[in-house]
Structure formats: C-alpha cells, structure tokens
Amino acid sequence: TDYTESPLLKNTISPHILQSIPQILQTYQSNKPYPHGVLNNIFQPTNFLQSVLHEIKHSSKVQFKESDLFKVYQSMDLGNLTDDPKSTLNSSSIPNVWKLKQ
C-alpha cells in the first residue's frame, strides 16, 4: 500500500514517516527484547496535537454528572462530530479535531 498518496495522511503525517514505513516495520519486528518502535515528529505541522488539545479545551462543553457511585464531567461525544453545518457539533468549530478524526 502506498500511504504517501492518501490526502488525509499527507496533510497530517510527516513525509519522513510515510516514506520510511517499510524500514519502520522492519525495525519494529526486529527490535529486542520484544517488538517495539519509537516514532519522533509524527505529525505535521509539529504543533498539530497541541492544536487539537487547545480546540478541545476551549471549544468543549462539559456537564457535571453525579450518581451514587461516581462524579464525572462528561464532554461532547466526538463520535458525533460531523461536517454538516446544521449540526450543533460540526467540524468548523474544531477543524483540527475533525482532521484527526478522519
């Protein structure tokens, strides 16, 4: 599979990662004492995940819920995130989260 041609991956994953997938897989499989790998600077732009975190912190609405067993702050369900402008939870308000979800 040529991952370098995927528009989604080209816009979020750093080119050096996409171009070295075969080497990454080989290194992962041959590392000892167990298969493992380390990937640095995976996303582009490099502050992509910071942007996602910022959007979630500043665009999320949370509700406090309490029962006999627990107390929790429940946030929006990102599974319901859509690109429909009529939706109350749409991609225009959190574009980097939308990009990550795709």
Image (spheres, rainbow, N blue to C red):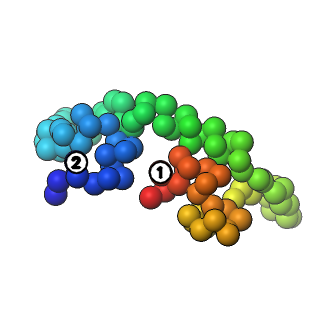
For the question of whether residue 79 can be seen, the reply is no
Amino acid identity at mark 2: Thr
Q: Nearer the viewer, residue 33 or 57?
A: 57
Other-residue count near label 2 (Cα within 10 Å), few / some / many at <14 / 14–19 / ≥20: some
Q: Quadrant of the N terminus?
A: bottom left
Numbered badge on residue 4? 2
Label 1 residue SS: helix
Across and down, in percent, residue 61 comes to 77, 53
| Left or right of 15 in this view: 67 | right
Residue 72 lies, in percent from the top left, at 78, 54
Give the label on residue 100, or none: 1
In this picture, residue 4 sits left or right of residue 95: left
Nearest the viewer among 68 and 38 is: 38
Q: Give the residue drawn at x 78%, y 53%.
A: 62
Left or right of 16 in this view: 51: right
Secondary structure type for disc 2: helix
Vertical relation: 50 (above or below) 87: above
Residue 53 appears anywhere in the view: yes
Q: Report crowding for label 1: few under 14, some 14 to 19, many 20 or more residues within 10 A (C-alpha).
A: few
**Label total for image:** 2
Q: Name the side, left or right, on which 53 lies relative to 73.
A: left
Q: Residue at x 48, y 37 (%)?
A: 48
In primary-sequence order, the first of circles 1 and 2 is 2
Mark 1 in CB contact with mark 2 (< 8 angstroms) = no
Q: For the point 32% across and 37% down, which residue is it?
A: 14
Question: Splitting the image into 4 quarters, where does residue 23 fall?
Answer: top left
In the rendered structure, which amino acid carries the disc numbered 1? Leu
